[in-house]
Image (cartoon, rainbow, N blue to C red):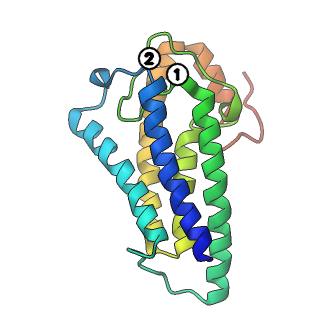
Amino acid sequence: MSPLILVLSAVATAFILIYWEYRERTTSRAKKGQSRHPGWVRIAIRVILPLIGLLVIVQFFGYFLFPYPVPSGLRETLQVIGFILFWSAIILSMWARESIGIHWAHSADFQVIPGQDLITDGPYAYVRHPIYVTFLLMFVGAELMVGSWLVLLAIPLAAFMHWQSIKEEELLVREFGNLYRDYQKDAGMFFPRLFKAKR
């Protein structure tokens, strides 16, 4: 993988971290003191997610790689797949964040915002949790680009995102009732539905 591509990918990761923080401070109406998560969970989420971003950045500069032993041809193929996943996820994550706008709450804040609308357009027309999907794809893509065994951390990350998504949907069903249940039939949790469920 070209050093220039890796540097640009590191810059893109830093941009996403800064962009997310800026958008939260300027648009999010979530009340941090009203999170339904215990305090230690809120702190863990707030600390771990940026640390993962920083880990990806230093890996793009050649540190903490833990390379997996594969033939060079396969390594190059995996790097190309990683490149496509990473940069597609960067674009899709910004689309998702802009689509949800002021109705977004950080996963650590875990709440329904007063006056919150149910967003069902943009990427939300296809999947109910596009931000979690793109975060995971960014991580997997980055690890494939640098060829690191740390790609296996995607498994506990995916498990956490699934757990968080279920907890969020319990809140949303209580808030929106049948409107959200119908939305669940139209859009997949993490993958677009090939066939929409009958109502």
Mark in front: 1 vs 2? 1
Query: Would residue 87 be found to the left or right of residue 57 on screen?
Result: right
Q: Which of the numbered marks, if any, corresponds to residue 113?
A: 2
Q: Residue at x 77, y 37 (%)?
A: 195
Q: Residue furthest left?
A: 40
> Is the C terminus in the top left, top right, bottom left or bottom right quadrant?
top right
Q: Which of the numbered marks, if any, corresponds to residue 36?
A: none
- Residue 155 visible? The answer is yes
- Spatial distance from mark 1 to mark 2, Cα to Cα? 9 Å
- Residue 105 visible? The answer is no
| Rendering quarter of residue 130 | top right
Vertical side of 77 occupied by 168: above or below: above
> Is the N terminus in the top left, top right, bottom left or bottom right quadrant?
bottom right
- Nearer-the-camera pick, 178 or 74: 74
Q: Residue furthest bottom?
A: 71
> Disc 2 marks which amino acid?
Ile
- Looking at the rendered structure, the secondary structure element under dot 2 is loop
Q: Residue at x 61, y 81 (%)?
A: 75
Q: Residue at x 56, y 86 (%)?
A: 70
Q: Position of residue 173 (x, y in %)?
A: 51, 19
- Nearer-the-camera pick, 23 or 35: 23
Task: Tell whether label 2 touches label 1 (CB within 8 Å).
Answer: yes
| Rendering quarter of residue 8 | bottom right
Identify the residue position indicated by label 1 in the image: 102
